[in-house]
Every structure is written in structure tokens, then in C-alpha cells.
Image (cartoon, grey):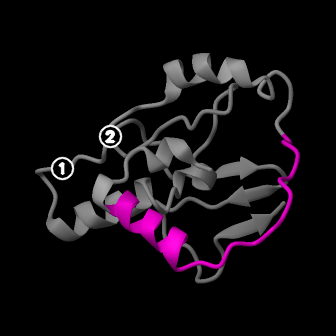
């Protein structure tokens, strides 16, 4: 779960999602998959340190210099869409190098993820070409 992005989602939207999943989605019985995180990231107690360094708490705040449509789009991209999870380069400890356009030009600038390259979202791309295998 991309909880670092979901931290930006409003309480109202989280409550609506919770109600939808609890009442509108039929549960599926399936065992959890084992974690695929590499050591030392697989040590759960280290997540407290990682969260202290990289988890920014607080809902998305609007940019007064931008319009309503831009802010709604940024809210969706940064939060529920968690687009930066694939399209923003990561640091040594797996953190996104930027969480918004305010942090760095690296935000949504394209990134390698496993054996895939997620193209930049800050440039014009051909339709249907968001992921390119290299």
C-alpha cells in the first residue's frame, strides 16, 4: 500500500472509501503473499526510522497560486493516484526523491522500477506508452 501517498487523502475521502470497501465489495478469501522487500527493508521495526525520515504527515494542501482544477488534479495525482510511486526516482532507502512539484524537479520525472521504466509524466508521451520495458 502506498501509504506515504495516501497520507495526503482527506478524511472525507478515506471515510467514503472505507464505506465502499466494507459495504460495496465482496470479500475474497486469499492468503497474504510473503513480503518481497530486500534486507534490511524487510525488517519491520526499521520502518519506524524510515517513517521518521520520509513520511510526511498531513493532508494535501491547495496551492493558492493555482486554480481549482489544477489543485484537484494534484490532489488525485499525489494522493489516491500515487503516480509518484512509479514515475519518480527513488533514493537508496526506497523513498521517493520528491513528493510533489514543490519538492524537486525529479517529481514525476520518470524512474526505473524493477525491470521497467516509467516514463516522465511531466513531458508529453505517446498515448498508451506509460511503461516501457528496457
Where does the image place residue 80, in percent across and percent down from the top left?
46, 60
Is residue 32 placed above or below 106 in the rendered structure?
below
Where does the image place residue 49, in percent across and percent down from the top left?
59, 16
Is residue 54 placed above or below 99 in the rendered structure?
above
| Label 2 environment density (alpha carbons within 10 Å; few <14, some 14–19, many ≥20) | few
Where does the image place residue 54, in percent across and percent down from the top left?
51, 26
User: For this rendering, which residue is in front, 90 or 62?
Assistant: 62
Q: Is residue 107 visible?
A: no
Identify the image quadrant of the C terminus: bottom right
Where does the image place residue 23, in percent across and percent down from the top left?
50, 75
**Residue 30 among magenta residues:** yes
| Marker disc for residue 102 | 2
**Residue 15 among magenta residues:** yes
Q: Secondary structure at mark 2?
A: loop
User: For this rendering, which residue is in front, 35 or 30?
Assistant: 30
The structure residue drawn at horizontal position 37% and vertical position 60%, both measured from the top left corner, is: 15
User: For this view, does 36 lie left or right of residue 8?
Assistant: right
The structure residue drawn at horizontal position 51% and vertical position 41%, both measured from the top left corner, is: 4
- Residues under labels 1 and 2: Cα distance? 10 Å
Q: Which residue is mark 1?
A: 63
Q: Quadrant of residue 44?
A: top right
Cβ atoms under marks 1 and 2 closer than 8 Å? yes
User: For this rendering, which residue is in front, 55 or 125?
Assistant: 55
| Label 1 environment density (alpha carbons within 10 Å; few <14, some 14–19, many ≥20) | few
The structure residue drawn at horizontal position 42% and vertical position 44%, both measured from the top left corner, is: 7
Read off the magenta span.
Answer: 13-36
Amino acid at each position: 500500500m502506498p501509504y506515504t501517498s495516501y497520507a495526503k487523502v482527506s478524511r472525507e475521502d478515506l471515510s467514503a472509501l472505507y464505506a465502499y470497501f466494507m459495504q460495496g465489495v465482496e470479500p475474497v478469501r486469499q492468503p497474504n503473499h510473503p513480503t518481497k522487500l530486500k534486507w534490511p527493508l524487510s525488517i519491520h521495526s526499521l520502518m519506524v526510522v524510515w517513517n521518521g525520515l520520509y513520511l510526511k504527515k498531513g493532508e494535501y494542501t491547495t496551492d493558492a497560486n493555482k486554480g481549482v482544477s489544477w489543485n484537484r488534479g494534484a490532489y488525485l495525482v499525489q494522493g489516491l493516484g500515487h503516480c509518484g510511486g512509479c514515475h519518480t526516482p527513488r533514493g537508496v532507502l526506497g523513498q521517493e526523491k520528491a513528493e510533489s512539484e514543490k519538492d524537486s524537479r525529479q517529481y514525476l520525472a520518470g524512474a526505473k522500477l524493477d525491470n521497467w521504466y516509467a516514463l516522465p509524466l511531466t513531458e508529453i508521451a505517446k498515448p498508451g506508452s506509460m511503461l516501457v520495458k528496457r
